[in-house]
């Protein structure tokens, strides 16, 4: 039985929690991570849903994980292996398709086939977006200052921000200002005419949001996902060997090597407060652990409304957290296959099976999908991002068999009348019949399917509201407003209690930035 | 006037405000108006169809600072206006009647009827709106610089004082104001109120005149914008009607030695080597001047009156992508007086979903089957504002669709005020295409450019060109499409005059 006294306790063994723990241990602290489930990873887990078929149950692609974290924690040495997804294919209803490859010229030629004008624009668009993403990237690594505070630290932060602003060219500055406020539809319509191209690009502006491509602010989400692309060519999105759980395993192994203790099946009940400071945690099983600091990597609602008694927080703060929007909007359908789905647009086994398949024929298609969601229904004709991991990593399924992962929007958390088995079944059926339109043999090769609604994400991964970013990426929930005004610097109104997860700046997407920055701030305050 | 220093295109309120300030500063100013009477959207028109229609807006108010600086009271503008009632229509006499006041007993009772908690929070909401509008007013009165090259004295100091004003609001209020801009009107209303009737009544004002829905991000901003221009939820009547405002401005221009020429439509803005040299009128007459200020919308000024060949390609491309997309129509009804409509501003905004659905139609080029309406009366005359009626219709055109518009306007209003239908004597409607043809509003956008977050402040009309200047030396913009613009306020005209005098 290990001693129950630590320097730091981390709630939740998601990637942010374990990364924070690893950085603290690296600085010589005695750290313990407490995980509710029997496995680590949070929303980045690989599970054998059907015997022999292994799925990246929730989060299914990697690209945003910060390079410096991969270096600092020597993740490759601990088994991290990213296998590239070389393409994105968007099938049309008329049997044609639009393909994007990891080779710019190849993609350009493909677009030219549909629209010479868009092929022209595509070159410039790629340059502009890459420049914008590079320009805004430093913000991700910046601890948001509090513009209302006069403290030395915040003033320095604001100055840093001002300097950053001045370091940008007038063009970059305006491009970013527009990207942060615009709708992805407006952005793309400035550039392109081809529906499938606009639809597919717009789709990455709505992933994880409760917004449609015509909603202002979605251009930022598009950029947020574009970050992954700037180091690679077309789409540097990759798939981790052994699924997304492989990423968590590597982080866990690296953390343990640095001396971090990770306890699974150790659900936290309350944060213990002594003398107005976080002093440890009480587990559901009654055990008590004490530490100088506690960091939560759970979502904001549980971190501040469940683990800690309200009396320890000012009313404003509690209100802000209550108002924080965490409505999940995406579902997932994981399908076990006895053979490959045969797509009418590219018959037979081909390169499209090794990449992503995007059901996004036009902006209007995606916008109409959203229209249904905002009135409390799941989309009858949903947007989908489909990949077949077993084509990239044969170990994911029995020989000759396959696993298919379908990310689906929209499936609103607060669906009218609430989710029940019938609705869940109907949702799964909608997904299958949508795939069937483009790959008619899907039902013959399907041997099993797992339907995941935002409620399942909440139940299994423990994310309140089932929002994959722990909180919607809305303009007023970003940077110095995330998760709450005046508390965006990973500290909380309760001394000794820190917050470092997707609900904090810079938001979700298996980046690890929040965990790393939280650890850095904790070490700054250490005395 | 033989050789004016400055030619001003268009005698809308912003053109006249700019003219008055410039004339007051001793410039020889000549305002050129295409139509027989000045006033822009505050003046009536004869439509292509032959019908004659009144001003587009039941009322309008210039910012007090402008009324005072230009001494408009001396020219017959009575500034003092009482608050009016805002009535959110609901079936069987359940209508919600609101005054924009924290203390009005009847208002608090009306709200209490829906929710005691909401009535208790009403004063806090009014206080917040007062703070937010006063900040926005200050922002609109401050010229937006060209980032990051801020001219320290000219622009830096006013900006700094604006930032200071924002910080002086203190942590809580400051964040509330900042956050509210990018929020949806629903989110904003939900932060204060639980009753949907009240939330929807407020959301109606938020989406008024813009092609957005109650759920769209940025309608928190448009709520504050519209509240500022109206001075609350309802339109406050202008003593003497909107025409009085125009007349006072024209008098102010003339009193300062300026001239306003009507029936003098500008056909072209003349440019030589990136420098403006004057204008050519529709009559063929040319007027020379080294300085031209246009109050027309940015796109028609730059791509229409100047012409793409004179402009940098990148700039042309940006100007083409300014989002106009108007979706407002007006229906003017003459009744026998038995319309049964109450005095004040009536909104048909029964629920948040209703407003969002009305907007959905616009996204797909359809006329809302259940439109958001805002209605005001003047004796027997009923003025209906209709949303959404998108400029670009799918599968039909506006001449064919005009009857649909008029019928839906009447039917919708009649569901709440049954007496109205029988009282209708005659009707005239203004479609987005009429707005474009008779008022020169590109795509029928009343605001000369959508009030969306990427087209306001230093990004209005275009990033880098919010300072009223253009790539053409001597050509300035002063219309609603500029920072401070959208709605009747005069901020854009006043800022433009300031920028011009700086040069």
Image (cartoon, coloured by chain):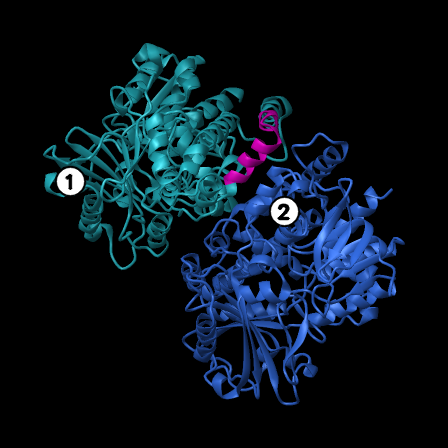
Chain colours: A blue, B cyan
Q: Residue B412 location in percent, x, y?
A: 22, 47
Q: Residue A265 location in percent, x, y?
A: 73, 67
Label 2 neighbourhood size at 10 Å, few (<14), some (14-19), many (20+)? many
Residue B288 in view of the camera: no
Q: Residue B257 location in percent, x, y?
A: 36, 12
Relative height, residue A521 to residue B381 (above, below) = below
Label 1 neighbourhood size at 10 Å, few (<14), some (14-19), many (20+)? many
Relative height, residue A445 to residue B122 (above, below) = below
Look at the image and say whether residue B208 sits in the magenta stretch.
Answer: no
Q: Residue furthest front?
A: A286
**Magenta span:** B164-181
Quarter in which the C terminus of chain A is drawn: top right
Prevalent SS, magenta region:
helix
Q: Are marks 1 and 2 in contact (CB under 8 Å)?
A: no
Residue B362 in view of the camera: yes
The residue labelled by disc 1 is B420
Q: Residue at x 67, y 43 (%)?
A: A488
- Callouts 1 and 2 on one subunit: no
- Spatial distance from mark 1 to mark 2, Cα to Cα? 50 Å
User: Badge 1 sits on which subunit?
Assistant: B
Q: Relative to residue A513, is residue B271 drawn left or right? A: left
The residue labelled by disc 2 is A483
Judge by depth and name the residue closer to the eye, B457 or A46: A46
Q: Quadrant of residue A150?
A: top right
Q: Residue A429 location in percent, x, y?
A: 45, 76
């Amino acid at each position: 039985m290990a001693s129950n006294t630590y320097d730091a306790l981390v709630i939740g063994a998601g990637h942010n929690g374990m990364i924070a723990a690893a950085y603290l241990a690296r600085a010589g602290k005695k750290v313990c991570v407490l995980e509710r489930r029997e496995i680590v990873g949070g929303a980045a887990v690989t599970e054998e849903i059907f015997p022999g078929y292994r799925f990246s149950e929730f989060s299914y692609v990697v690209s945003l994980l910060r390079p410096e974290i991969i270096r600092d924690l020597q993740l490759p040495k601990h088994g991290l292996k990213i296998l590239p997804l070389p393409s994105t294919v968007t099938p049309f209803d008329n049997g044609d398709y639009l393909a994007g490859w990891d080779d710019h010229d190849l993609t350009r030629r493909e677009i030219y086939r549909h629209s010479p004008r868009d092929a022209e624009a595509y070159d410039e668009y790629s340059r502009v977006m890459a420049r914008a993403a590079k320009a805004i990237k430093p913000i991700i690594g910046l601890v948001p200052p509090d513009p209302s505070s006069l403290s030395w630290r915040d003033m320095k932060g604001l100055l840093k921000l001002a300097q950053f602003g001045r370091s940008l060219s007038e063009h970059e500055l305006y491009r970013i200002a527009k990207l942060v406020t615009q709708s992805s539809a407006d952005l793309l319509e400035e550039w392109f005419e081809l529906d499938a191209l606009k639809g597919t690009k717009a789709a990455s502006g709505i992933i994880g949001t409760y917004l449609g491509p015509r909603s202002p602010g979605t251009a930022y989400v598009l950029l947020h996902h574009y970050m992954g692309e700037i180091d690679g060519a077309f789409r540097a999105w990759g798939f981790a060997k052994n699924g997304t759980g492989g990423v968590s395993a590597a982080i866990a192994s690296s953390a343990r090597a640095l001396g971090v203790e990770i306890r699974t099946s150790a659900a936290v009940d309350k944060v213990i407060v002594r003398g107005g400071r976080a002093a440890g945690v009480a587990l559901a099983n009654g055990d008590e652990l004490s530490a100088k600091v506690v960091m939560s990597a759970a979502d904001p609602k549980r971190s501040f409304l469940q683990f800690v008694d309200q009396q320890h927080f000012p009313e404003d703060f509690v209100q802000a957290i209550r108002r924080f929007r965490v409505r999940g909007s995406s579902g997932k359908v994981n399908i076990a296959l006895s053979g490959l789905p045969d797509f009418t647009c590219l018959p037979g086994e081909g390169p499209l099976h090794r990449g992503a398949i995007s059901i996004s024929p036009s902006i209007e298609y995606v916008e109409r999908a959203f229209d249904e969601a905002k009135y409390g229904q799941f989309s009858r004709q949903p947007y989908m991002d489909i990949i077949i991991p077993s084509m990239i990593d044969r170990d994911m399924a029995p020989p000759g068999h396959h696993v298919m992962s379908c990310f689906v929007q929209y499936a609103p958390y607060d669906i009218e009348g609430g989710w029940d088995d019938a609705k869940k079944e109907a949702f799964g059926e909608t997904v299958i019949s949508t795939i069937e339109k483009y790959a008619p043999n899907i039902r013959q090769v399907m041997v099993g399917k797992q339907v995941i609604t935002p409620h399942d994400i909440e139940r299994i991964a423990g994310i309140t509201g089932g929002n994959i970013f722990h909180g919607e990426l809305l303009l007023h929930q970003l940077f110095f407003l995330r998760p709450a005004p005046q508390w965006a610097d990973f500290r909380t109104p309760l001394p000794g209690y820190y917050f470092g997860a997707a609900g904090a700046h810079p938001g979700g997407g298996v980046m690890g930035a929040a965990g790393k920055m939280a650890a850095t701030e904790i070490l700054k305050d250490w005395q | 006037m033989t050789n004016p220093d400055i030619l001003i295109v268009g005698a809308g309120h912003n053109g006249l405000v700019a003219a008055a300030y410039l004339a007051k500063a001793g410039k020889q100013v000549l305002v050129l108006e295409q139509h027989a009477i000045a006033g822009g959207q505050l003046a009536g028109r004869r439509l292509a169809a032959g019908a004659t229609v009144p001003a587009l807006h039941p009322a309008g108010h210039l910012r007090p600072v402008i009324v005072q600086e230009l001494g408009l009271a001396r020219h017959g503008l009575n500034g003092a206006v009482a608050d009016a009632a805002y009535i959110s229509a609901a079936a069987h006499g359940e209508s919600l009647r609101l005054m924009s006041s924290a203390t009005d007993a009847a208002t608090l009772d009306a709200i209490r009827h829906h929710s005691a908690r909401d009535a208790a929070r009403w004063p806090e909401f009014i206080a917040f709106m007062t703070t937010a509008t006063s900040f926005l007013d200050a922002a609109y009165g401050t010229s937006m610089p060209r980032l990051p090259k801020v001219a320290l004295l000219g622009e830096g100091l006013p900006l700094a004082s604006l930032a200071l004003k924002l910080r002086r609001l203190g942590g809580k209020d400051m964040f509330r104001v900042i956050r509210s801009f990018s929020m949806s009107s629903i989110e904003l209303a939900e932060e204060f109120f639980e009753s949907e009737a009240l939330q929807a009544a407020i959301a109606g004002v938020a989406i008024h005149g813009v092609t957005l829905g109650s759920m769209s991000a940025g309608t928190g901003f448009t709520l504050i914008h519209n509240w500022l221009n109206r001075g609350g939820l309802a339109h406050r009547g202008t003593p003497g009607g909107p025409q009085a405002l125009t007349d006072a401005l024209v008098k102010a221009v003339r009193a300062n030695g300026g001239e306003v020429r009507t029936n003098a439509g500008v056909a072209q803005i003349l440019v030589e080597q990136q420098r403006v040299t004057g204008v050519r009128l529709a009559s063929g007459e040319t007027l020379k001047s080294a300085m031209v200020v246009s109050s027309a919308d940015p796109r028609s000024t730059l791509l229409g009156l100047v012409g793409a060949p004179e402009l940098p390609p990148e700039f042309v491309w940006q100007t083409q992508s300014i989002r106009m997309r108007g979706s407002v129509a007006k229906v003017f009804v003459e009744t026998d007086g038995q319309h049964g409509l109450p005095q004040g501003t009536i909104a048909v905004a029964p629920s948040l979903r209703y407003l969002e659905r009305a907007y959905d139609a616009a996204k797909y080029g359809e006329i809302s089957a259940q439109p958001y309406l805002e209605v005001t009366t003047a004796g027997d005359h009923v003025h209906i504002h209709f949303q959404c009626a998108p400029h670009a219709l799918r599968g039909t055109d506006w001449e064919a669709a005009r009857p649909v518009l008029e019928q839906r306007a009447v039917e919708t209003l009649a569901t709440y005020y049954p007496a109205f239908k029988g009282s209708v004597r005659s009707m005239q409607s203004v479609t987005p295409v009429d707005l474009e043809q008779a008022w020169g509003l590109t795509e029928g956008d009343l605001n000369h450019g959508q009030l969306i977050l990427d087209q306001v402040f230093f990004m209005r009309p275009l990033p880098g060109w919010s300072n009223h200047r253009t790539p053409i030396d001597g050509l300035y913009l002063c219309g609603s499409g500029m920072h401070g613009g959208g709605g009747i306020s005069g901020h854009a005209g006043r800022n433009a005059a300031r920028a011009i005098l700086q040069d």
